[in-house]
Image (tube, coloured by chain):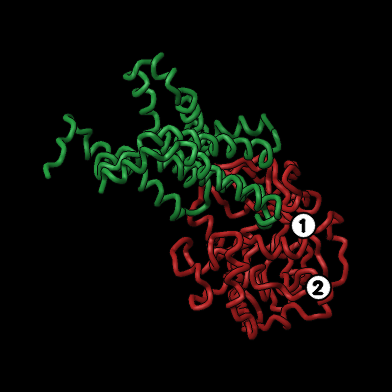
Amino acid sequence: LQGKPSPYSTDADANTLEEITNYNNFYEFGTGKEDPARHAGQMTVDPWSVEIGGLVERPGNYGVEDLAPDNALEERIYRLRCVEAWSMVIPWIGVPLASVLNKVGVQPGAKYVAFQTALLPDQMPGVRYPILDWPYREGLRIDEAMHPLTILATGLYSDPLPNQNGAPIRLVVPWKYGFKSIKSIVKITLTSEQPVATWKSMQPGEYGFYANVNPEVDHPRWSQATERRIGAGLFGGRQETLMFNGYADQVASLYQGMDLTKNY
Amino acid sequence: MTRTLNDVLRRCPVWMLWLGGMVPLALLTWDTLAGGLGIDPIREIEHRLGRTALYFLIASLAVTPLLRITGISLMRFRRALGLICFTYAGLHVLSWLSMDMGFLWGQMARDIVKRPYLLFGMLAFVMLTALAITSNNLSIRRMGALGWRRLHKLVYVAAPLVAMHWIWALKTFPVTPGFWLLVILALLGLRVAVPRPLRRAKPARV
């Protein structure tokens, strides 16, 4: 898989493929960081279709190639900041979400985009337990969804996206905590109301709808001021977390006038 | 049967328990040097040390109920079980402040006051420290048996705090630490339910 280089990429050193594919939060395959690598191989990702509906001009079922054709792929080397205060740098391959939304035609009344992960009890051992309210759901405001940094990824390094990283197609929103970047998407719905977000609906005091990386607004149970970079070694220490994960120049304007301690 | 077992246990030197107790540490050191700790070795070191401390704490809590219910006496080993627990708890805290937090003292101090799971853990560690420092004959003599016993009742508070420290650190309600919390509460409950025998049990008639 080949993606065109992009000015949105960071020049920080990327984590290794081994690190990126063996340290995942994908609770459908278990809550351990190694569980997704162990169990996600069972998931069938071909054929796959994404049902796009709601306030769109051309609703329907779309294949992965329809949404992210080879000639449109870009490489996006992004920082990833997990809400658990660790981070990585990941070379995604994908397309801007905006290109997909433009393809299906957004109706004027659409204010939000809702996403849903596949729910495959035969292939996902984690969903047999009610840890979360399955299927996993997430959402973005329409301007966040249309932002050029927001992509749908279908590849990692030069490989098709490994299953444990959300194959065959996932969202990547680099200025938000990782749990917003929903994996293995089967459904995209344009809505006028703010959609359900799984973590927010479970623990609204801990996870908000926006979930923007913000060193000044702590998670109630741990500080978000610093982060531990995976792969930094035993005594690599911590680094300071940057506002909007370092993407403030591009995205801060989206939240102008909003109280980020309330809209966390 | 119980008597034979107790005879064997009596002959068992306490240093053998220490030797066994250091096996998890040796394995962890080996895995660290061999690179067998996966993608995030810091988390693994921290968690394995913490879990091992908890297991030894539970073992030390089990000594009294075991004696009262089955007559099997591990009393000679209880101090060592507690001190091994404290060794792992100390290393767990040390790994947190060095490798995990990188000696960011200010952030650590703010975190401890603000975050329940750190507060639970630190309170438990302070209590365990007090128990470890007084785990010697001199302290028992100085404090008097009654005072010493009263202090060491702190383990009733420390043990559930340790389990809550683990539960509160995770994102969803976790099964494993929840299970250990139940075990701890059961062991503490047994002390109340099966009281210390007032009289020495009569030797069994043959």
Residue positioned most to the left: B205
Which class describes the residues within 10 Å of circle 2: few (<14), some (14-19), or many (20+)? few
- Say if B68 sits above or below A53 in the image: above
**Snapshot quadrant of residue A99:** bottom right
Mark 1 is on which residue type?
Val
Q: Mark 1 lies on which chain?
A: A
**Position in image of residue A140 (x %, y %):** 64, 61
Residue at 49% x, 31% y is B123
Residue A158 is tagged as 2
Q: In this view, does B119 lie to the left or right of A111?
A: left
The residue at the point 53 percent across, 64 percent down is A30
Spatial CA distance of label 1 from label 2 is 15 Å
Instruction: Report the front residue among B18 and B142.
Output: B18
> Is residue A264 in sight in this rendering?
no
Can you see residue B205?
yes
The answer to whether A94 is drawn above or below residue B100 in the figure is: below
Residue at horizontal 22 percent and vertical 40 percent from the top: B193
Chain A: colour as depicted: red
Check if mark 1's residue and mark 2's residue have beta carbons within 8 Å: no
Name the residue tied to disc 1.
A89
Is A14 situated above or below B139?
A: below
